[in-house]
Amino acid sequence: MDIEVGSNLYRNSDGTIEIEGVPQVQVTQHPATGALLVNFALFDVNGKMLAKMVDSTLMFNERRAYDVSKTAERLAMKETETGKVVLQLDVKSPGLVSCSRAEFHTMKGHLLEVSAKEWKIEKQTKAGQTVDAKGGAVSIG
């Protein structure tokens, strides 16, 4: 599977996005329908888990602070109170998923920001790169 994170393209990944060495997002497509299936763990700045998504469904949602809207081609997780997008993933074509918007903390408490042009975490920024993941995870940070 190919995954875009901002303007960066990661080819031949296994669908896992590791952030600062920790698998935090897993993306697959349903084999029969092609629907987007996402596993995601959301943390606060102290590394405490706030929400957990399994197969695009919230399984744990502390204080009901997050909402998920989804179609077969798109998933968006937002803060209930503010409407701020925490994570958005889109199927661009079979085998290509794009993360063009995200803003959440890593397990280590650092803020990851993804826009259409780049991803940023701490003092690292990446834009416009193509990386062959060689069947492994996409590595950020």
Image: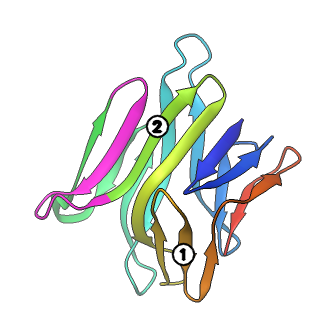
Residue at left 62%, top 22%?
94
Residue at left 52%, top 61%?
117
| The stretch drawn in magenta includes residue 97 | no
Which residue appears farthest toward the right when viewing the image? 134
Which residue appears farthest toward the top when viewing the image? 32
Q: Secondary structure at mark 2?
A: strand
x and y percentages locating residue 53 in the rendered image: 41, 48
x and y percentages locating residue 118 in the rendered image: 55, 65
x and y percentages locating residue 79 in the rendered image: 21, 60
x and y percentages locating residue 98 in the rendered image: 54, 43
**Relative to the observer, which residue lies in front, 31 or 122?**
122
Q: Quadrant of the C terminus?
A: bottom right
**Quarter where residue 56 is shown:** top left
For the record, the magenta segment spans 71-85
Relative placement, left or right, of 127 versus 80 is right
> Residue tagged by mark 1?
120
**Relative to the observer, which residue lies in front, 19 or 65?**
19
> Residue tagged by mark 2?
90
Q: Amino acid at mark 1?
A: Lys
**What's the CA distance linking mark 2 and mark 1?**
20 Å
Relative placement, left or right, of 133 versus 42 is right
Colour mode? rainbow
Determine whether 76 is above or below 83 in the image.
above
